[in-house]
Image (cartoon, rainbow, N blue to C red):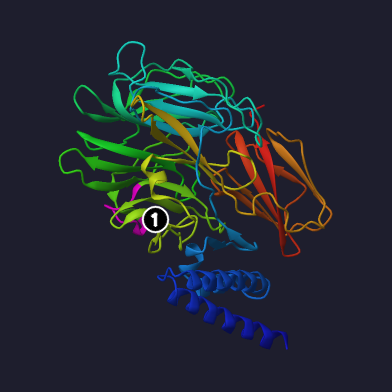
């Protein structure tokens, strides 16, 4: 009887999905009301069926409609909605940047002082005490908390960093040399000769008190095309414990875009990058600008969010391969309710409010119509999906301690833990243990914020902990 009821629900869901697809291109008010009713029924049926059929089968029924509706489905999870609120300017006490100048502001997020919350680190074009042909690195400390951020006044040229003669730079952080602290890598498009280079600033301080050495140019075999501009990312795309390199390169003459990938064939402490390959893992070489990586569907591997020029808009590529052997599906255009303008400004993905989901920080220029002055702002698009740290298994009493923790984390549960998964702040699984003991070693993890997802009796709960240095 249960099997018959499940098959009936599955058949009904297929009909609803087909009906919704047939009415997606109609904007009449009556059709919009009809679509809203269909979506509510689809959501309800998905939640019921997820407890009865494999999530992979449910994903197949929904197809690309899942992303159109902002739905993703993860293993051992309920229906998860990636839904982003409209961006707001200068949240959490931030103020305007570059007042009076139409300039570029490139943000990234990192826990640079190892206090368990995310700080901001920015590239400010043209902000210099000496000349507007120089630009500044800027640090904005989070003096609030992991769940209620509050940002201090900007500190320019911090931690021994100096101004650079660049019109454009994209800063990213990773523990590139495996010594437990955050190093800085950035692409720099120079003013004087329009040259493009990769700068590596080693953190010669520590995880709590950074200090950066003079930059090394194009280290570790990294390669970018001279006389071009590039947007770069470091990401452990093959889940082998070291950071691989991605670069979207813009040809200075033709303005064509090329996505390049260099695998780290060295080690976590001694990186060495392979020769560049174009269009890796099924991603088109000329149509993914500045890809961002996160596990949007909570299946343990990294998906891609980027910008597309043809067709114009935000594109999402689901990883239909695995965490160690990625393979990206055909793109979905404009998912999750995101606006196209958001990706124009090189956003960064970060759980800035500590609720267990990925938010988006970006930047934009604003103008005063009266006096025609420009200024830059940081924008914040909150992930409003009702997932995050909400416990799906409220009957299990869970204790994690000590938290923060440098070496061994104790995990106590009133129910038997079937699987323990540790995710980094981008949603990527960094450690997974079947039938774990009560003591989990976290010594190999880089200091920062992590999430532990526990599976008990087929239900999950998610908890945050901070890996400290000492």
Residue that carries the numbered disc 1 in the rendered image: 315
**Callout 1: few (<14), some (14-19), or many (20+) C-alpha neighbours within 10 Å?**
many
Name of the residue lying farthest toward the left:
253
Q: Magenta stretch: residue 468 in it?
A: no
In which quarter of the view is residue 328 placed?
A: bottom left
At horizontal 43% and vertical 50% (from top left) the residue drawn is 339
Residue 386 placement: quadrant: bottom right
**Furthest-right residue in view?**
414
Image label count? 1
Quadrant where the C terminus is found in the figure: top right
Q: Work out whether 466 lies above or below 16.
A: above
Residue ID at (72%, 62%): 459
Q: Position of residue 226 (x, y in %)?
A: 21, 34
Q: Nearer the viewer, residue 276 or 369?
A: 369
Residue 22 seen by the camera: yes
Label 1: which secondary element: strand
Q: Position of residue 177 (x, y in %)?
A: 47, 31
Q: Please provide the residue range marked out in magenta.
A: 281-289
Q: Say which quadrant the N terminus sits in.
A: bottom right
Q: Is residue 276 above or below residue 76?
A: above
Task: Work out whether 213 lies above or below 9.
Answer: above
Choose top left, top right, bottom left or bottom right for residue 171.
top left
Rendering coords of residue 377 (x, y %): 45, 31
Seen from this angle, which residue lies furthest front? 370
Q: Nearer the viewer, residue 194 or 274?
A: 194
Towards the viewer: 155 or 464: 155
In the image, is 3 to the left or to the right of 142?
A: right
From this viewpoint, is residue 172 visible?
no
Q: Main secondary structure of the magenta part?
A: loop
Residue 15: image location, x then y, percent: 53, 82
């Amino acid at each position: 009887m249960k099997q018959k009821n499940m098959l009936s629900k599955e058949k009904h869901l297929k009909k609803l999905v087909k009906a919704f697809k047939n009415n997606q291109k109609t904007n009449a008010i009556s059709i919009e009301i009809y679509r809203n009713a269909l979506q509510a029924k689809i959501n309800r049926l998905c939640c019921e069926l997820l407890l009865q059929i494999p999530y992979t089968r449910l994903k197949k029924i929904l197809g690309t409609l899942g992303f159109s509706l902002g739905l993703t489905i993860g293993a051992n999870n309920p229906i998860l909605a990636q839904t982003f609120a409209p961006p707001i300017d200068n949240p959490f006490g931030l103020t305007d940047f570059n007042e009076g100048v139409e300039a570029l502001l490139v943000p990234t997020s990192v826990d640079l002082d190892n206090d368990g919350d995310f700080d901001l680190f920015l590239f400010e074009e043209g902000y210099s005490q000496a000349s507007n042909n120089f630009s500044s690195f800027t640090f904005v400390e989070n003096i609030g908390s992991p769940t209620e951020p509050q940002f201090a006044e900007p500190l320019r040229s911090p931690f021994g960093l100096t101004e650079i003669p660049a019109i454009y730079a994209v800063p990213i952080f990773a523990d590139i040399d495996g010594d437990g602290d955050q190093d800085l890598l950035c692409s720099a498009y120079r003013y004087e000769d329009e040259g493009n280079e990769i700068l590596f600033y080693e953190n010669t301080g520590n995880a709590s008190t950074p200090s950066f050495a003079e930059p090394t140019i194009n280290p570790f075999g990294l390669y970018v095309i001279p006389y071009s501009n590039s947007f770069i990312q470091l990401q452990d795309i093959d889940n082998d414990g070291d950071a691989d390199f991605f670069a979207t390169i813009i040809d200075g003459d033709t303005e064509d875009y090329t996505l390049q990938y260099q695998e780290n064939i060295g080690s976590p402490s001694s990186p060495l990058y392979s020769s560049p390959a174009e269009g890796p893992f099924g991603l088109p070489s000329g149509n993914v600008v500045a890809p961002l990586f996160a596990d949007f569907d909570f299946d343990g591997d990294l998906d891609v969010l980027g910008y597309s020029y043809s067709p114009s808009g935000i594109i999402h590529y689901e990883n239909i391969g695995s965490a160690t052997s990625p393979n990206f599906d055909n793109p979905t255009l404009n998912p999750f309710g995101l606006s196209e303008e958001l990706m124009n400004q090189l956003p960064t993905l970060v759980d800035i409010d500590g609720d267990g989901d990925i938010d988006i920080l970006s930047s934009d220029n604003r103008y005063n119509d009266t006096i025609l002055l420009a200024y830059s702002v940081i924008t914040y698009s909150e992930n409003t999906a009702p997932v995050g740290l909400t416990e799906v298994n409220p009957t299990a009493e869970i204790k994690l301690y000590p938290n923060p923790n440098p070496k061994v984390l104790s995990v106590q549960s009133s129910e038997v833990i079937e699987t323990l998964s540790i995710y980094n702040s981008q949603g990527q699984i960094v450690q997974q243990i079947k039938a774990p003991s009560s003591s989990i070693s976290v010594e190999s993890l880089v200091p920062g914020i992590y999430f532990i997802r526990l599976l008990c009796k087929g239900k999950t709960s998610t908890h945050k902990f901070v890996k400290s240095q000492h």
